[in-house]
Image: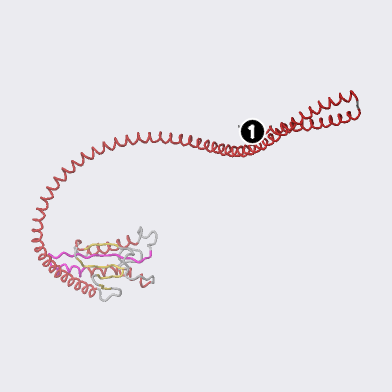
Amino acid sequence: MFKRSKERENAWPAFVDLFSNLVIILIFLLIVFIFLYTMTNVFSGPARENTKAKVAELEQVRADQELELKNLAERELQSQQVIMQVQHQAQQLDLEREQLRSELEQIRMAMEQMQMERDQTRADIVRYQQQVQDLEMSEADLNNLVMGLEGKIMESDAALRDREEQKRILTDELAKLNAALAESDERAREQEVQFVEMSTRLNRALANKMAEYMEYQSEFFKAMKMSLGGMDGIDISDDRFVLPTEILFASGSAELEPVGRTQLIKIANVIRTMEIKIPAGTPWIIRVDGHTDIKPVKPGTKSFKNNRELSLARAMSVTKFLQSQGVDKSRLIPSGFGEMYPISSGNDEMSLRQNRRIEFRLTNP
């Protein structure tokens, strides 16, 4: 197609050459005519006749050439028409060529796009192949897992059948237990009535016993206070008789002082009297509780590590002395609480003195 267009573009110079040749021929004929006319005026006689003959020939030639020129003109007109057609066709071809160039550019871009898409497709194919391989491997793993799960399902089915059998057995046992429970509920209702009656009697007996203990406590504390002759620092609070440790011990010591021994002899006499007054079938004890203040023991004081050890050692000293005075050892229970359970929460000397104490409690075991 491009070769044909090139041939049409080269047709114009050929017509230009033809037209130039025609112009040259006309100029040549004009020169010949002028020459013959001059010769006609110059020559006469036979020469003139010859000249006329030649002129006639030249005129004939000129006529022929004019005819030829006319033909050439006609052919030139036809050539011009052909040239115009060719130019029109050339313009059309130029348009077609530009259109083809545009189409070729679009085709080239489309081919580049197709190449990119083909490259992307190849990459996708490679990726998909890898995914397919991974899926095949996963499928193999899933198959193995499914086989394992099927085995577990079979085991579960067997276990389920065993559980169903156990459930049936348990259901039968539950029915028997429900029957037994109903019977037991009936007995329980009967026993509950008996329990209420027994609880009522027991509460009444406990109330009587507590009243009896309170009576013994009141008598014990009254006798203790009278025996000690209104000594300073002695206190009776609810169910306890409080004796300051300053009466019994030196600071930081668990060894009884002579004055303290004298006071404990009086307390032992009161306890022996209570042993006679309280009926033999009534269980009772006297708790001897040792307490200290919040100040820590001094290092090296009788090897006591802390206040609790000191308070317990003091309670045991009191208990041993009372036993030595004839008090039944089964009636005495020593214990040490150190700085815990203070009577007063202050840090002044009065508060600290109140917290350093020995408590006697008459209570049931």
Residue 126, percent from left and from top:
46, 34
The quadrant in which residue 220 appears is bottom left
Is residue 238 part of the magenta span, yes or no? no
Q: Which residues are drawn in magenta?
A: 268-295
Q: Give the camera-side residue of 38 and 276.
A: 38
Residue 10, percent from left and from top:
69, 32
Residue occupied by mark 1: 5
- The residue sitting at 25% across, 39% down in the picture is 153
- View extreme (bottom): residue: 230
Q: Residues within 10 Å of mark 1 (few under 14, many from 20)?
A: some
Q: Give the camera-side residue of 50 and 139.
A: 50
Q: Give the camera-side residue of 349 and 59.
A: 59
Residue 56, percent from left and from top:
82, 27
Is residue 274 part of the magenta span, yes or no? yes
Residue 355, percent from left and from top:
33, 69
Q: SS for tag 1?
A: helix
Q: Is residue 125 above or below residue 346?
A: above
The quadrant in which residue 134 appears is top left
Does 130 sit left or right of 56 as displayed? left
Q: Report the quarter where the N terminus lies.
A: top right
- The residue sitting at 22% across, 63% down in the picture is 332
Amino acid, disc 1:
Ser
Does 173 sit left or right of 355 as displayed? left
Q: Give the camera-side residue of 48 and 338.
A: 48
Q: Is residue 239 above or below residue 60?
A: below
- View extreme (front): residue: 45
Q: Report the quarter where the C terminus lies.
A: bottom left
